Amino acid sequence: MASNGLSYDFTTRPELAGTFGMVASTHYLATAAGMAVLERGGNAFDAAAAVAFTLHVTEPHLNGPGGDVPIILATAADPVPRVLCGQGPAPAAATIEHFEGLGLQLIPGTGQLAAVIPGAVGAWLTLLRDHGTLPLRDVLEYAIGYAEHGHPVVTGVTRTIGAVADLFRAHWTDSAAQWLPGGEVPRPLDMLRLPALAATYRRLLNEAEAAGSDREAQLNAAYHAWYEGFVAEAIDAFAHREVFDETGQAHRGLLTGADLAAWRPGYEPTVSLDWRGVTVHKAGPWSQGPVLLEQLGMLDALGELPPHGSAERVHRVVEVAKLAFADREAYYGDAPEAYAAVPDLLSPGYLKDRASLVGEQASGDLRPGSPGGREPRLPKFLSEARSIAETGATRDAMSAVEKVESTGRTRGDTCHIDVVDRWGNLVSATPSGGWLQSNPVIPGLGFALGTRAQMFWLERGLPNSLAPGKRPRTTLTPSMITRDGVPVTAFGTPGGDQQDQWQLLFLLNHVADGLNLQASIDAPAWHSSAMPESFTPRTRAPFDILIEDRFPEDVFEGLRARGHHPVRSGPWSLGRLSAVSRDPETGVLRAGANARSMQGYAAGR
């Protein structure tokens, strides 16, 4: 296929095909660990957990044990996709009044105040207990080995450590002790050891095996050790320490051991939309998942897609995204009114009405709709001048990870995992949070707490207003496709607010245009910066489009003519997708992974 001078015959690596199993993730060592688990007889859920624990070691700037994960899964016995929510909620003491008492209008993006209950490990232990087959030792040994004996550290980790090294030396000395061996920033491919994290996982395994030989009893004991035992005790003690954050001051945390003990990950149905012969499944409005479905529905309402690679297509996709993400700001959150709004947000009539707002020129306005006659309400902050970023200043999530702003603010990004096995089990997961740059290392544990609470608003009465026990409206958003009720594809990407823009491009490439998984991932990408960032400082650039400069010049000219501000990005810089698939008729499994970060990989046979 070729359009507008772009060719898709060449891909950065082949689309893999086989019949045994496929693993794709954002780091090649983690992918290899998952494949090794499949080879020793484990299923897709065992493999996905092995990948996840390994990513805690190999991509600590993008996720960690103190972070979160939403998982979409379908089993060979029950093909109906379900969500396993590893997104922890706000602590019991996290109230708007508390932050008002500190004189804050936004929750800081670093430090103790933004910590929520760390849900990632609980979700993986639950997945293993309910759907895995192997003992915990067989799953954890890869992460323990890389943490204990070392692994060649990738460039992104060293750049991130370098960006926050001064902060570590001046304020977060426990982090300096771990991430600055010998007082120096590690160099790319240096062997990086994380002995404290290795010891944490070894103790977790020992406490699990002390429960006896029964696999379920071991996993329950591991869960207890994490959420009521030695890990919860260390977190409880750490949260009382004052930690310097991006406000320029030190604050005590709100998270307690009692918060961890009271929480459990849970299963819930997906939100889905029928689209072009398939059904696309996402997590609910506590995530940004439904925004992908809204975009698909609006694009269908507008009729035939403009040609692949054209300015017309970029324009239409961007304008639809603006409308869908405006709805996100007005209606999404972990609140009853958000769940009630979803059917109306995805109704054909509403999506057709929304699509009719797409014009020939770019819009810079936030324009939420009125699903079911509701009156939209946007956060007041978004009407203030400080919510608008300087034109051309916004970047993709990954580039923001490796820098520190003048305020001391830092950012993190995310990982992604997809696995399919020979039995037809399928899983898509997007681990994130607990970044090495989000909070100091917890003494004795070797990992940091996350900062997901920064996604709450401190304004009352919004679906995403802060409240104790409430999940922040996260950007983490794995995806699954079914065809005739049978799961066929799992896919996703890191990227913060860009995740459901880049995933939309994948779906258009793969389902609408017929490109294979790898070609769909490799195709030139773009995203709009018009939607408010979910991360502090919550700004937006209404007319900016970041676009890979593999596009020909006439595309840039066409976008300018329509009122957009195209910002050239590197030729291979946007999107870090991976995907796996299974053909139910033939049993053939396929996989593809992103080459842009130079560390994502797929493996299979």
Image: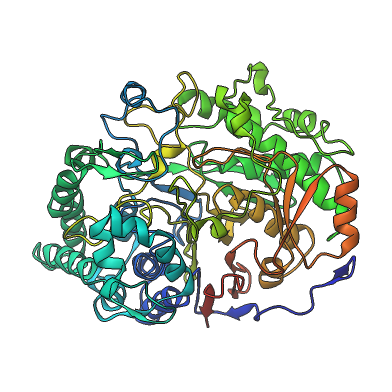
Give the left or right position of residue 420, taking residue 217 as reference. Answer: right
Residue shown at 14% from the left, 65% from the top = 203
Which quarter of the rendered picture does the N terminus lie within?
bottom right
Image coloring type: rainbow
Residue 523 located left or right of residue 473: right
Q: Is residue 476 above or below residue 208?
A: above
Is residue 304 among what the camera can see?
A: no
Q: Answer yes or no: is residue 505 visible.
A: yes
The answer to which quarter of the image holds residue 14 is bottom right
Q: Position of residue 594 (x, y in %)?
A: 60, 70
Marker count (numbered) = 0
Q: Give residue 339's position: percent from left, percent from top.
A: 51, 29
Instruction: Relative to 456, say whether 210 is above or below.
Output: below
**Quarter of the image where one finds residue 356:** top right
In this rendering, is residue 441 above or below 19? above
Q: Percent x, y for residue 77?
A: 44, 59
**Between 533 and 137, the one nearer to me in the picture:** 533
Q: Is residue 414 above or below residue 472?
A: below
